[in-house]
Amino acid sequence: MQSFFIGVGAIVASFLPSIFTHWFNITNVATEPGTLPDSIRYSYYIGAFMLFVTVMWTVFSTKEYPPTEIGEEKLRNREHRKIEEEIKYQSVFLRKGSILILLGLVIAAIVFLAKLEKELFVLGFGLVVFGLVHVVASAYIQKGKAYLGIVHIVKDFNTMPKTMIQLAYVQFFSWFALFAMWIYTTSAVTSYIFNSTDPMSKAYNDGADLVSSLFGVYNGIAALAALFLPIIAKYTSRKMTHFIALLCGSIGLGSIYFISDPFWLWFSMIGIGIAWASILSIPYAMLSGSLPAEKMGYYMGVFNFFIVIPQIIAGTVLGVMLTHLFNGQSIYILVSGGVSMGIAALLSLRVDDHDEVIIKSS
């Protein structure tokens, strides 16, 4: 149902620029270089307004239940909150933190000395920050403050359930592919199929409008596919369902390379939509059965790291790949995204879906 409602909302959002252009005669061409067409600007205004309204609706309408008296007592009891094997984890955190900091500094030094793109500093900075968090957690344990939240966060991150680790790799390659698609589909379609790289030209803006509509289509496909995923999972398995969906997405994304007629792009979106529906739901279904109940909220939050991290890496390295590997041809970024989603599909077959085994055996 989550995938369904996300798909429906995204359909409306994706078609907004076309609606403004064809229904309200609002221009879809930028009036001067470096600016956005009015149809795009107005779409962003509506998106910002809807985001604010829906967040506020959730904040003021959702009831949050407080913990039980026993739960509150455990939260207040510092001794109860200390982690086990403190000496072991103090050493582990310090060692891992030092390695991460050193690796981050090495990457930063290479980027600086080789005069590579400055955005690559983000990778080194991220590793240094992550390493410092480990070192700080180690220092708190040494000071007898193992009850602090940061210590528990670092400890739980380093002791994630096996299924969560396996899904992390699947998520990484899935979202790397998606981010490549979201960033570069417009430039790939306009240059490769519409033969225009000038944002002021009609051909370019026609291609950009088509991409917006295509995104609406794949979200519509996702809304429909979401209703059938449970049926497929019932007769196969959740990981097989996810494998099939990601494979469809890989084929859909990679097929754009072989298309010259814009009409056939609509068929590419079918595979991408099926993958999108699965990415939004099935990994969480597999994950929930592998998590300890008392850590459910924490691990679900940490699981989002494996959405954000590949997006940061994609935003950092894809531009470098485009310049140095693909000679500025965005279409090859989409092909890389297709390969990445194919890797995710294969990795999904390795996931230990314990909860599903229990359900079927019972």
Image (tube, rainbow, N blue to C red):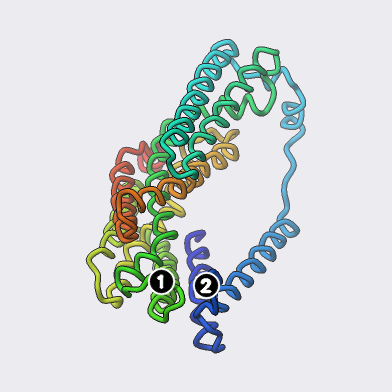
Secondary element under disc 2, as helix, strand or loop, is: loop
Q: Residue 348, position in %: x, y?
A: 33, 43
Q: Residue 167, position in %: x, y?
A: 41, 40
Q: Is residue 254 left or right of residue 207?
A: left
Secondary element under disc 1, as helix, strand or loop, is: helix
* Most distant residue in the top direction: 87
Instruction: List the residue tagged with mark 2.
Output: 33
What residue do we see at 46% from left, 27% from top?
106
| Disc 2 residue type (three-letter) | Pro
Instruction: List the residue tagged with mark 1.
Output: 211
Q: Which mark is residue 333?
A: none
Q: CA distance from mark 2 to mark 1?
A: 21 Å
Question: In which quadrant is the C terminus drawn?
Answer: top left
Q: Give the answer, above or below, for where 87 lies relative to 310.
A: above
Q: Decide which of tag 2 and tag 1 comes sooner along the chain.
A: 2
What residue do we see at 22% from left, 66% from top?
258
| Circles 2 and 1 in contact, beta carbons < 8 Å | no
| Disc 1 residue type (three-letter) | Val
Viewer-nearest residue: 266 or 294:
266
Q: Residue 156, position in %: x, y?
A: 55, 28
Mark yes or no: residue 231 visible: yes
